Image: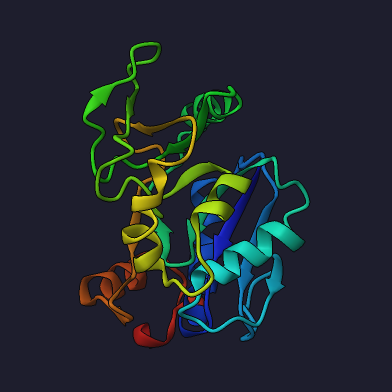
Amino acid sequence: MKVIVFACDLYADIAPAYWYLHQKNWPDCPYPVEFVTNSEELQIDAFVHYLGHPDLRFGSRLRDFVKNHFGDPNGLMLVMMIDYLIRTSVYQPFIDKAEALCKADEIRHVRLKPMPHPPEVYEPDPDFGIIDKKARYSLSLQPGIWDAQLLHDLCQDDESPYHTETHGSSRVKHQRGMFLSARTPAIVHHNYYKKKRAQDWAVNWVKANVPKELWPNDCR
């Protein structure tokens, strides 16, 4: 499994703060971490794929990455977004359980933050719940482990992150396999941006928790 962090040019300035908090709160992360963005350079010491797609075409960026750069379309990827600033220590044993579940043939996705909360307990392991594949936000870009080919197939080239979730959710019911969600968060994060704008409270939180030299533009 790899951790794949999706970025875009509009949010490139948050990359140093994201990477600092990722390393601080997940220092024992056992997976390779790769970033995927468009064209603006990310000021981080990590491997970045520059794919050159328009910012709003999240679907084409993800599909291009899985098809041409991921390396194992049948493998697993833990999807993060660049403005998901990890707030507390990541609980690795929980992620280990989620990864093991995803390796079972009948389970193809495990969401690591219960948003929305799963309506039904997964009886073999009550730490997890079953996502209703016919419900709104059955496809969510909250942190989660995905069968890479499945997420590729659920995305469409012209869709933004918002439409990937809203329109993509209508396609989930046609896919085989079970979707699960953690019932308590395995990764606790703050969303720095809302509707393309930095949230005031998030700016203040970053100022209090990230070294000044790594602040994004709205913190300066």
Comparing 20 with 13, the one in front is 13
| Residue appearing at x 40%, y 11% in the figure | 124
In the picture, measured across the screen, residue 212 lies left or right of residue 128, that is right
Against 61, residue 170 (above or below) is above
Comparing 38 with 186, the one in front is 38
Q: From the image, which quarter does the C terminus lie in?
A: bottom left
In the picture, measured across the screen, residue 219 lies left or right of residue 106, that is left
Against 34, residue 162 (above or below) is below
In the picture, measured across the screen, residue 190 lies left or right of residue 212, that is left
Against 193, residue 165 (above or below) is above
Quarter of the view holding residue 53: bottom right
| Residue appearing at x 39%, y 15% in the figure | 125
* Color encoding of the figure: rainbow
Q: Please indicate, yes or no, whether residue 213 appears anywhere in the rendered image.
A: no
Quarter of the view holding residue 119: top left
| Residue appearing at x 21%, y 71% in the figure | 201
Q: Please indicate, yes or no, whether residue 19 appears anywhere in the rendered image.
A: yes
Comparing 64 with 27, the one in front is 64
Q: Residue 136, percent across and down?
A: 25, 49
| Residue appearing at x 39%, y 56% in the figure | 168
